[in-house]
Amino acid sequence: MVALGVRRLREAVGSAVVAGIVAAVLSCASQPAAAAEDTNLPIPRFVTLRSEEANARTGPGTQYPIEWRFMRRGMPVEITAQFSQWRKIRDWQGAEGWVHQSLVSGRRAIVVTGIPRILRRRAADDASPVAQVEAGVIGRLMECDPGWCRMEVQGYRGWLKRTEFWGVYPGEKVE
């Protein structure tokens, strides 16, 4: 019955496509049970890059070609999917790819977006400024309240509005 199905499939789509499908099915069938392991962590979630250089691949494994090369240690990324020891990540500009779990850390960070922003002493528009922070600068996320987050950016500590950076979800509580 399987041979009959494969023969009909070959006739419909061609031998090369069938060979690829069969190889993929056999590869999945031979994966150890741990390949579907679940970390019980939420998807999506924010993490940071652990390495100065991270190869982002088109799929979850070294057999897949490198699509991007992330070159910024501590950069916040969002995990959007996972398979075994591989994490599909997306950066603040929308670039995506699969990286090995060893290349990400649970530490939280943000990246300032848009125009230069004012880091404030308190979580208020009228609070005194601590520093001006340029777009693209990365900061360490410390805590968030409903409208503001406290962070450390290049040695300065202060507050930014949630709308002024990328790296937290709306309404997410960070402590």
Image: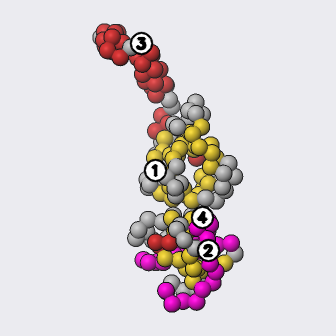
Q: Amino acid at mark 2?
A: Val
CA gap between label 4 and label 3 equals: 48 Å
The answer for how far apart the CA atoms under marks 4 and 2 are is: 9 Å
SS at circle 3:
helix
Q: Residue at x 46, y 47 (%)?
A: 81
Residue 5 screen position, x and y as percent: 31, 13
Please report contact status of discs 4 and 2: CB closer than 8 Å, yes or no: no
Label disc, if present, on residue 80 of the rendered structure: 1
Q: Residues within 10 Å of mark 1 (few under 14, many from 20)?
A: some
Q: Are marks 1 and 4 in contact (CB under 8 Å)?
A: no
- The quadrant of the rendering that contains the N terminus is top left
Q: Earlier in the sequence, mark 1 or mark 3?
A: 3
The residue drawn where x is 57% and y is 83% is 120
Q: Verify whether residue 146 appears in magenta.
A: yes
* Residue 10 locus on image (x, y percent): 36, 12
Q: What number is the disc on residue 15?
A: 3
Which of label 2 and label 1 is nearer to you?
Answer: 2
The image shows residue 61, relative to residue 70, as above or below, that is above
Q: Is residue 9 left or right of residue 55?
A: left
Give residue 119's mark. none
Q: Nearer the viewer, mark 1 or mark 4?
A: 4
**Residue on which disc 2 sits:** 133
Residue span colored magenta: 125-154
Give the farthest residue toward the front: 115
Q: Earlier in the sequence, mark 1 or mark 4?
A: 1
**Rendered image quadrant of residue 8:** top left
Q: Please report whichever mark, 4 or 3, sits nearer to the chain's N-terminal start.
A: 3
Tell me the amino acid under the disc marked 1: Thr
Q: Nearer the viewer, mark 3 or mark 2?
A: 2
Q: Main secondary structure of the magenta part?
A: strand
